Image (cartoon, rainbow, N blue to C red):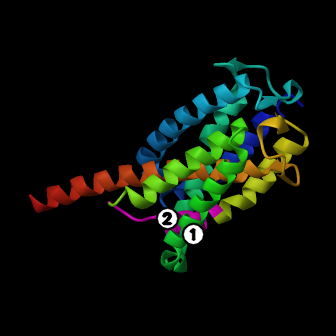
Amino acid sequence: MNYTYLLINLAVIFFPLALSFDKKVHFFSKWKFVLPSILITGLVFLIWDILFTKLNVWSFNPDYLIGVNLLGLPLEEILFFLTVPYACVFIYECLNAYFPKNDLQKYSLAISNLFLGLCVAILFFGYNRWYTLINFGFLFMVLAYVEYVNVEFRFMYKFYRAYLVSLIPFYIVNGFLTSIPVVMYNDKQNLGFRVGTIPFEDHFYLMGLLLMNIYLYEVFKSRVSKKEGLRLEN
């Protein structure tokens, strides 16, 4: 039982890691972009996680942990910010490689505006709950920046497709974590609405986590492409 959360982490990353050498995707060749994206985003979310643990927004069931703690967090929770983003960015790249046609391109801005409006509405009603406030506040800022400040490249139509597919493993993994439960939520700090055993906010926590990772991933790829283009010109 003490290895439950650790085994969940290993299960999350096993297939994406094993399939990273797929000939069509060549995901291993993109690790130089993936790893810094994961580390930067992970640092932001770790700070958030430490704060939420201290504020009793959530806690961890010691029965399902190996007992190693760093920065006040279980080792498994820190690994979560490596395994889940890696798996999700892998899904993103696989979809782009195998299904290059994407009709969401025509609707991505409208979808983003709907999510921005949802963030504002939920913040209006749930501003006095820590998880709701920080979760939707963060998503609003990142989404608004990507859509209205970032002008270098457009990728949200690809992002939304990857997010939808990522919800499938999300329901499996988060379903285990919240039903056993490994992670225990304080409903006074969220809206109190759950999909099965999964708090409503978790869906948008995943969206913010994935969006920051993929945005940075695309930034690093774009910079290398520009440098290579300049070399060819010279």
Query: Which of the two labelled residues, at mark 2 and mark 1, occupies the earlier sequence position?
Result: 1
Whether residue 129 is situated above or below residue 201 in the rendered picture: above
The residue at which mark 1 appears reads as 111
Mark sitting on residue 4: none
Q: Nearer the viewer, residue 228 or 53?
A: 53
Instruction: Tell me the magenta residue range.
Output: 152-163
Are discs 2 and 1 less than 8 Å apart at CB? yes
Look at the image and say whether residue 134 sits in the magenta stretch. Answer: no
Residue 231 placement (x, y as % from top left): 15, 55
Taking the spot 66% from the left edge, 65% from the top edge, the residue there is 164
In this picture, residue 17 sits left or right of residue 9: left
Please identify the quadrant where the N terminus is shown.
top right
Whether residue 170 is situated above or below residue 55 in the rendered picture: below
Taking the spot 56% from the left edge, 44% from the top edge, the residue there is 138
Looking at the picture, which amino acid does disc 2 mark? Met
Looking at the picture, which amino acid does disc 1 mark? Ile
The residue at which mark 2 appears reads as 156
Q: Secondary structure at mark 1?
A: helix
In this picture, residue 230 sits left or right of residue 203: left
Rounded to the nearest whole Å, what is the CA distance between mark 2 and mark 1? 9 Å
Residue 22 placement (x, y as % from top left): 54, 61
In this picture, residue 187 sits left or right of residue 80: right
Q: Secondary structure at mark 2?
A: helix
